[in-house]
Image: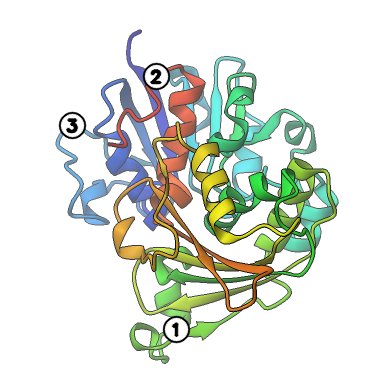
Amino acid sequence: MSKVNILIAGSTGYIGAQLVKLLNKHKKINIKYLCGDRSVGKKISYFDSNINDKFLPKIVKFNKRFLNKVDVIFAALPNGETQKLSNFLLKKNTLIDLSADFRLKSPEDYKKWYKIKHSSIANIKKSLYALPEINRNKIKNYSIISCPGCYPTSILIPLVPLIKKNLIKHKNIVIDSKSGYSGAGRKIHKLYKNKNLYNSLSVYGIKYHRHNSEIQQELNYNTNKNVEFTFTPHLSPMFRGILSTIYVDLNKNLDAKYIHGYLKKFYQKEKFIKIVKLNNMISTNDVINTNMCNISICSSKKNNKIVILSTIDNLIKGGSGQALQNFNVKFKFKESLGLI
């Protein structure tokens, strides 16, 4: 197969720049357009000096005419923008969206959580929430592929198979997640200009964090249960990485060893999921700059409870890497191409 022509919309943010870095090394991809707004005319290395842009185009403003010349659009745009772009798609185009615009199946839920009226409701029905380890076989059938958020990725991968198999209780789940500040985008430096961002840990979005809706939707949809959980995100003084600590109650007199064995078997063929040794105290350090999700199952002081630890790099497995993984699945390339 000849190279796939690519347009990247929103190429200068943390996720966008990481996406350029990955796609630029992919043997089957030709980056034809890099699109931005205030960055028009600049080279992408202006935003990330680690990108070799010798053969990359300068950043241009998006024009719908570009869609005639590309096969795939990777969109790393602010929420509300990709849905507008989707209205210009041609039959030949595949859209891989890294924003939240097509994650929620209900436009009412989208408006509730994102305070934006959805402008492409017809395209919601044509889109797939694409977590490859959970619904890989469906990806090839959709032209709009919605990549999960970073927090939900770290949470859904361990929880979906366990709840679906009735190994853990689907109520009273407590999720404590900590993310590097890159997850908030470049604007975080302005928002925290007078605060000690780099040396403090802060909590935010209690009850109202937007990823609540996404986590709820996908847990319910994939398990056929009304899952009840409490999710609390934290901003950590590190650039990248997510650690989710998940507290769950066990079913059927099971123990941590059984849960560990089940998950290890469930994900044994997955290149990007590693179930580490029982009671292993994992850290984000082991997944930084990779597309891996590392999961540890830990015993609790109480016999009927366990603690699940899940780590990812929010910019790769929680963003650009997962987008590329979905691309590889869609176009029937080796799934790890460009990621290992």
Quadrant assignment for the C terminus:
top left
Which of the marked residues, 3 or 2, is nearer the chain's N terminus?
Answer: 3
Residues 128 and 335: in front is 335
The residue to which callout 3 is attached is 55
For label 3, the SS is loop
Type of amino acid under label 1: Tyr
Indicate the colouring scheme: rainbow
For label 1, the SS is loop
Residues 282 and 38: in front is 282
Query: Residue 108 location, x and y as percent?
Result: 85, 52
Q: Quadrant of residue 88?
A: top right
Disc assigned to residue 192? 1
The answer to whether residue 13 of the structure is visible from this angle is no
Badge 2: how crowded within 10 Å, few (<14), some, or many (20+)? Answer: few
Q: Is residue 88 above or below residue 232?
A: above
Q: CA distance from mark 2 to mark 1?
A: 42 Å
Q: Is residue 41 above or below residue 254?
A: above
Tell me: 217 left or right of 201: right
The residue to which callout 2 is attached is 333
Type of amino acid under label 3: Phe
- Residue lying at 38% horizontally and 90% vertically, measured from the top left: 196
